[in-house]
């Protein structure tokens, strides 16, 4: 395709040129090469428009240009994929296989062109077609392969694996519609399909020869003879068809492979039913198989939804493990040393059924002895825990698992028997401990504890921040840690500096390049060189100019999506994340209500203008989260139309939050709200992206915010609220939230306004349930932290009044973010957990 293999013109004959002359000649050579590369790209782009897209170059629209550029990039990436795979097979390399339900990769065009070193040349070539890079990039749909932080993390990690040269595969599901596209109608969230594949994807490589059969239901026949395994006879088989996406590294020829599975019926339709005229039955036959890969996280409030979610998890895990085993046998011939060559990572509990599935493959299909197979399983798997909340630690009813996966429940029971016997030898006569660590929960409905299965089946279990790992060892996995402390560790999450600074914030990236050079893209620790510039008035002024341009870009998006105009001189206060009670968007909107009331009471009090921006999806079955979204819109309607607060307060909710929207929000944020109740947020990567782009953090001491404080300094943050141990102690005490409200007039006024219908006069009791829940339970300690939260907001206002001081703190923040690189995190995984080395 383009740029990187351009021949360099011969050096001048004379060797007596001055340094200035040599520099001038070097610059001329570089300019010549760049011009030649751009001319070549122009020719290739026109050829693709004619030959592949089928349109005359002078009539090509933005979508045609996007697909033509994608075709050029895809060709180069395919070559890199083939070369990398060949190199891995020659070694043969130990590979890491990253299993995750979500890979939120966003748009691929900019990432691909940046990795190939030709984004600037592509942007100039587009100008010859009277097209702008931003308009062309907008034609690509976000890949609907995830929802939130889990998916964005896995996408960053795959890119870092390629950048570091690691032999790596990601495995997931090729969702046809993703989770859902969020729109707002009359202030309420409305979910609609997100058909990101309706026009195809230019980035996919279908693999028609890779097609695995995944069974469900049926029965298990007893062993044919002593010592032989049981035989599972599934009732139905679903076909898993492979589609590959190539994830390129930065400044390297290396790529990672993201293999996604699409579910298909063994036969496309029930032809006999069709011929009888029973067309609904004919389609039902097809849909019963293919709905597995339709939608991410189907609503599990119904028995059918719960079963579909279990089928999804087993489907992609079973197909992935069959794929890994087959590739291993092709290269090594035997499974006896499987774990020496394959590292399999369970990112959260969704693929935890893989522990039982790999046992089934090794014992039932490939006839390894049970103890030999179990040794290989435990040495192959590692597991990242992402939550400590009991309601989020996945469990499955034994009855459901036995019906959908009858052989796997047998395997789990035997693993549990062996595990409890092993633990009893270490802690004899401790029945309470055995009940706590059992893979089967016996209280009430008997359920399989998937996190326990992941722990028992893995050689390493890690948390995703220092605080999270400590709490993990002290709470949900305390007994496991006591039995085997060496199995537990932590790897603090990180984000890609290429995607989340270089690509999404080119203005700041250029300023940083000019100040310290471009090496930060591969070594984010070099950002430390910016720290002295926090005291440089000229640099601070240029930094503020970049920020203002980014805020203007965000303001234009706000106006486009919400019809609300905002003041660029106001403090852009951002909270963007999945809507959940523990993330406390409710506390944020109550603060907006307090600010609105306070401005109305004292309009001349010297208020700092504030634009509060929220975004995020509420799960379709999460009624409280959906109600919070509605409250945000009702409050926004009142506040934004009130002349008493005009110019001083705006509240906006940007719909359909995803990667591309985040790439606009992160660079434009002044303040990053990370206000989860301490001890509930495992890590958080949105906080890292916002801080990397220069936003100051207002937050609790939760997740990785604690580690950010250690590196940027508390003076550049606004911390507040109960710590994790204090939150636990308060919950365990006789905490009476209503008493706190009774003693706090300003808080009482806020709740009174919400609860009595100030913001919903057409339905005064609309939010009574939210208020009652706070007054009588306050499970997420919103009221307990509210006063401290307002004080932190006041400190933010005070600093924002001094733009130079704010800029100094923001530069200090950027300078301290080197530790939070996905490259550092992946390198830690590779060395300490996966034992995977780079391959040239």
Image (spheres, grey):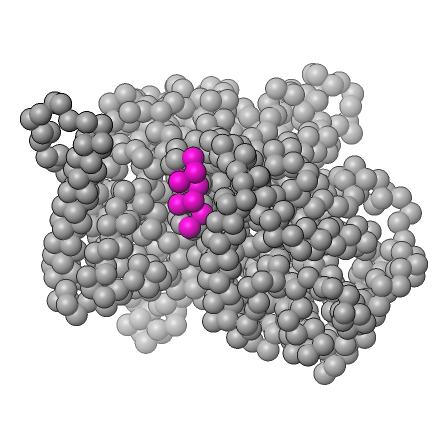
| Quadrant in which the C terminus appears | top left
The residue at the point 11 percent across, 29 percent down is 11
- Examine the rendered structure and indicate whether residue 790 appears above or below residue 477: below
Magenta span:
507-516
Residue 720 in view of the camera: yes
Q: Main secondary structure of the magenta part?
A: helix
Residue 446 in view of the camera: no
Q: Nearer the viewer, residue 538 or 688?
A: 538
Question: Measured from the top left, where is residue 200 in percent x and y?
Answer: 29, 60
Question: Measured from the top left, where is residue 442 in percent x and y?
Answer: 72, 40
Lateral position of residue 19 relative to residue 642, left or right: left
Q: Nearer the viewer, residue 395 or 46?
A: 46
| Quadrant in which the N terminus appears | top left
The residue at the point 34 percent across, 29 percent down is 165
Lateral position of residue 582 relative to residue 93, left or right: right
Question: Measured from the top left, where is residue 445 in percent x and y?
Answer: 70, 47
Rendered image quadrant of residue 99: top left
Residue 513 lies within the magenta run: yes
Residue 312 lies within the magenta run: no
The residue at the point 36 percent across, 67 percent down is 283
Q: Nearer the viewer, residue 2 or 93?
A: 2
- Examine the rendered structure and indicate whether residue 168 appears above or below residue 131: above
Q: Residue furthest top?
A: 425
Question: Measured from the top left, where is residue 297 in percent x and y?
Answer: 52, 55
The residue at the point 40 percent across, 20 percent down is 340
């Amino acid at each position: 395709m383009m740029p990187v293999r351009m021949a360099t013109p011969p050096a001048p004959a004379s060797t007596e040129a001055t340094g200035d002359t040599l520099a001038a000649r070097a610059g001329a050579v570089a300019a010549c090469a760049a011009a030649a590369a751009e001319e070549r790209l122009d020719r290739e782009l026109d050829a693709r428009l004619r030959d592949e897209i089928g349109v005359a170059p002078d009539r090509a629209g933005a979508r045609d240009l996007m697909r033509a550029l994608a075709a050029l990039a895809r060709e180069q990436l395919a070559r890199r994929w083939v070369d990398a795979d060949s190199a891995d097979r020659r070694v043969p390399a130990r590979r890491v296989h990253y299993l995750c339900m979500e890979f939120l990769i966003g748009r691929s065009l900019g990432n691909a062109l940046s990795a190939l070193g030709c984004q600037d040349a592509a942007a100039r070539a587009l100008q010859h077609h009277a097209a702008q890079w931003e308009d062309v990039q907008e034609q690509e749909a976000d890949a609907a392969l995830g929802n939130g932080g889990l998916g964005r993390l896995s996408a960053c990690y795959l890119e870092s694996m390629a950048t570091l040269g690691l032999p790596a595969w990601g495995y997931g599901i090729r969702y046809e519609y993703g989770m859902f596209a969020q729109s707002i109608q009359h202030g309420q969230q409305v979910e609609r399909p997100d058909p990101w594949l309706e026009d195809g994807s230019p980035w996919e490589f279908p693999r028609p020869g890779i097609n695995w059969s995944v069974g469900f239901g049926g029965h298990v026949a007893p062993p044919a003879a002593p010592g032989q395994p049981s035989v599972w006879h599934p009732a139905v088989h679903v076909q898993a068809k492979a589609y590959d996406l190539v994830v390129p590294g930065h400044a390297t020829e290396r790529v990672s492979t993201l293999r996604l599975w699409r579910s298909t019926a063994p036969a496309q339709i029930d032809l006999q039913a069709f011929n009888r005229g029973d067309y609904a039955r004919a389609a039902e036959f097809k849909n019963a198989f293919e709905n597995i890969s339709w939608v991410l996280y189907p609503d599990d409030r119904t028995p059918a939804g719960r079963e579909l979610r279990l089928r999804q998890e087993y489907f992609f895990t079973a197909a992935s493990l069959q794929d890994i085993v087959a590739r291993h046998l092709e290269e090594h011939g035997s499974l006896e040393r499987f774990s020496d060559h394959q590292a399999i990572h369970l990112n959260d509990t969704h693929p935890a059924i893989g522990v039982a599935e790999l046992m089934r493959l090794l014992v039932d299909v490939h006839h390894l002895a049970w103890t030999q197979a179990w040794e290989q399983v435990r040495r192959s798997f590692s597991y990242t825990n992402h939550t400590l909340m009991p309601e989020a630690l996945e469990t499955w009813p034994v009855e459901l698992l036995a019906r959908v996966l009858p052989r796997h429940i047998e395997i789990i029971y035997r693993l549990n028997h062996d595990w409890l016997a092993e633990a009893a030898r270490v802690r004899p006569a401790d029945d309470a401990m055995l009940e706590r660590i059992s893979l089967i929960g016996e209280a009430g409905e008997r359920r399989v504890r998937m996190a326990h299965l992941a722990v028992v089946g893995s050689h390493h279990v890690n948390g995703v921040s220092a605080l999270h790992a400590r709490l993990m060892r002290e709470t949900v996995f305390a007994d496991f840690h006591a039995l085997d402390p060496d199995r537990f560790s932590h790897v603090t999450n990180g984000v890609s500096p290429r995607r989340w600074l270089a690509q999404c914030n080119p203005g700041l990236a250029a300023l940083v390049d000019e100040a310290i050079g471009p090496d930060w893209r591969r070594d984010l620790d070099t950002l430390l060189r910016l720290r002295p510039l926090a005291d440089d008035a000229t640099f601070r002024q240029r930094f503020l100019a970049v920020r203002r341009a980014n805020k203007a870009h965000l303001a234009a998006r706000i106006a486009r999506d919400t019809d609300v105009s905002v003041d660029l001189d106001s403090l852009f206060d951002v909270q963007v994340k999945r809507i959940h009670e523990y993330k406390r968007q409710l506390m944020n909107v109550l603060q907006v209500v307090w600010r609105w009331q306070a401005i109305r009471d004292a309009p001349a009090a010297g208020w700092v203008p504030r634009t509060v921006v929220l975004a995020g999806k509420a799960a379709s079955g999460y009624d409280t989260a959906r109600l919070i979204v509605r409250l945000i819109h009702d409050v926004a309607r009142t506040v934004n139309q009130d002349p008493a607060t005009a110019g001083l307060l705006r509240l906006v909710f940007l719909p359909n939050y995803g990667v591309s929207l985040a790439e606009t929000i992160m660079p434009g944020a002044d303040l990053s709200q990370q206000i989860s109740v301490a001890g509930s947020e495992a890590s958080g990567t949105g906080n890292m992206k916002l801080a990397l782009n220069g936003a100051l953090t207002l937050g609790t001491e939760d997740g990785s915010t604690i580690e950010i404080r250690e590196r940027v300094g508390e003076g550049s943050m606004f911390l507040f609220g109960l710590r994790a141990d204090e939150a636990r102690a308060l919950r365990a005490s006789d905490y009476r939230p209503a008493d706190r409200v009774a003693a706090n007039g300003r808080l009482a006024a806020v709740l009174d306004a919400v609860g009595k219908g100030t913001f919903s006069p057409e339905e005064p009791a609309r939010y009574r349930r939210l208020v009652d829940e706070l007054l009588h339970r306050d499970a997420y300690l919103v009221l307990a932290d509210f006063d401290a939260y307002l004080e932190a907001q006041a400190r933010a206002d005070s600093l924002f009044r001094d733009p130079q001081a704010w800029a100094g703190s923001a530069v200090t923040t950027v300078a301290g973010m080197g530790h939070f690189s996905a490259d550092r995190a992946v390198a830690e995984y590779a060395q300490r957990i996966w034992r995977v080395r780079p391959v040239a």
